[in-house]
Image: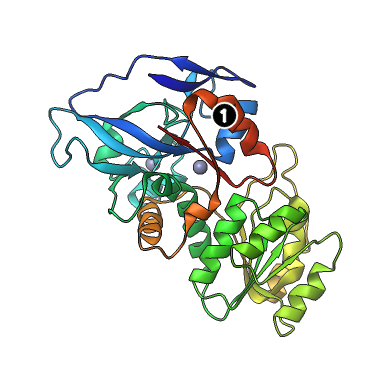
């Protein structure tokens, strides 16, 4: 079968590799759609701390497909079932896992990150994915490529729940890449009265408006604080989500937030540039709640799939290009471009 294999920092290759063999307690998935994540691009360039030996590995963790083979000791699944899966598995026994938040398990593992992933014609699903509830049987109203986008949407569910967006919040989203526009749609769905997007790239600002933002501004050309204050009856943004790798944006968010504002540092900062400074008293006197989120819990993953299946968020609109596995180089190249949102491999 064809697969996109990470070769070590800086390189991927399309290789012909054997179809994985499964144990009696595993599933073989015929991958039908898998989308490229910012994490895949980062792994391609810099590797991943979960792969300390920098070993060769099939990338990809945003995936949906059909069951090709069910291990002989498994019940409840059949060949042909349409499924997708949450990519992270926790250890299952730590405090975070017991609390249902395997995304904060210190010993998590994930397809495409610490084991072979989804950019392949077939993928082995290890038994822990099955026993821990990572697999979701897809409703008929969701396509494979939409289901592959359930993973990025679920991280947005996680971020939006942390700041509890509700009417009549005025929401500021910094950054209008794929995650930023998903946040725009999620904020609207949760009842934000106004969504303001701050983004320096013009094409991305236009995209943000197409995805439902009420205002999209270039913070280098306009005064963001004036716009936020003007759009929020003078109080500042009730919710701020930083979906860009910008320490400056994180620092400034405290000034832009309303009293009792909730802020989510959704995007991580590049290594070595992850120190910021701010006036602590702003947090104190304004009663700011500051959170950071990463990944998703299993329930948040299921919510994302149901939100897509119920057509409350149209993730198809994010697909900027469709590729076959053999065009991996082109697809990865395209995924880096600023006006690209999501790239999907169809098998
Ligand atoms: Zn992802
Ligand atoms: Zn754990």
Residue in view at x 35 percent, y 54 percent: 302
- Whole-percent x, y for residue 110 in the image: 43, 34
Residue 149 vs residue 334, the one in the foreground: 334
Q: Mark 1 = which residue?
A: 48
Residue 182 vs residue 292, the one in the foreground: 182
Residue 78 shown left or right of residue 127 in the figure: left
- Whole-percent x, y for residue 256 in the image: 74, 70
Residue in view at x 30 percent, y 32 percent: 29
Query: Is residue 84 in view?
Result: yes
Residue 262 quadrant: bottom right
Residue 124 quadrant: top left
- Whole-percent x, y for residue 222 in the image: 85, 66
CB of mark 1 near ligand 1 (< 8 Å): no
- Whole-percent x, y for residue 334 in the image: 63, 36
Residue in view at x 76 percent, y 80 percent: 230
Q: Secondary structure at mark 1?
A: loop
Residue 306 quadrant: bottom left
> Measured along the vertical axis of the image, is residue 276 above or below residue 272?
below
């Amino acid at each position: 079968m064809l697969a996109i294999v990470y070769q070590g920092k800086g390189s991927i290759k399309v290789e012909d590799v054997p179809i994985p063999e499964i144990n009696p307690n595993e599933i073989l998935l015929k991958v039908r759609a898998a989308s490229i994540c910012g994490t895949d691009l980062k792994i391609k360039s810099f590797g991943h701390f979960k792969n300390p030996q920098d070993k060769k590995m099939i990338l990809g963790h945003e995936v949906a497909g059909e069951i090709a083979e069910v291990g002989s000791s498994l019940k409840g699944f059949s060949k042909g079932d349409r499924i997708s899966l949450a990519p992270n598995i926790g250890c299952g026994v730590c405090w975070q896992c017991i609390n249902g938040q395997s995304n904060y398990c210190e010993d998590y593992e994930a397809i495409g990150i610490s084991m072979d992933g989804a950019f392949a014609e077939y993928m082995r699903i290890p038994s822990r994915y099955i026993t821990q509830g990572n697999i979701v049987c897809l409703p008929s109203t969701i396509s494979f490529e939409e289901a592959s986008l359930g993973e990025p949407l679920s991280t947005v569910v996680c971020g939006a729940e942390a700041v509890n967006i509700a009417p009549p919040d005025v929401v500021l989203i910094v950054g209008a890449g794929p995650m930023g526009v998903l946040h725009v749609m999620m904020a609207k769905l949760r009842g934000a009265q106004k969504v303001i997007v701050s983004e320096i790239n013009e094409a991305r600002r236009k995209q943000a408006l197409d995805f439902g933002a009420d205002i999209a501004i270039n913070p280098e050309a306009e005064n963001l604080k004036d716009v936020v204050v003007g759009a929020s009856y003078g109080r500042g943004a009730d919710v701020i989500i930083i979906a860009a790798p910008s320490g400056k944006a994180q620092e400034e968010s405290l000034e832009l937030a309303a009293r009792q504002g909730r802020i989510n540092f959704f995007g991580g900062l590049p290594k070595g540039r992850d120190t910021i400074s701010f006036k602590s008293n702003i947090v104190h006197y304004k009663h700011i709640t500051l959170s950071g989120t990463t990944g998703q819990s299993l329930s948040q993953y299921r919510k994302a799939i149901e939100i897509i299946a119920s057509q409350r968020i149209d993730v198809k609109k994010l697909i900027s290009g469709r590729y076959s596995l053999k065009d991996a180089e082109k697809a990865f190249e395209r995924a880096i471009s600023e006006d690209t949102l999501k790239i999907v491999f169809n098998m």
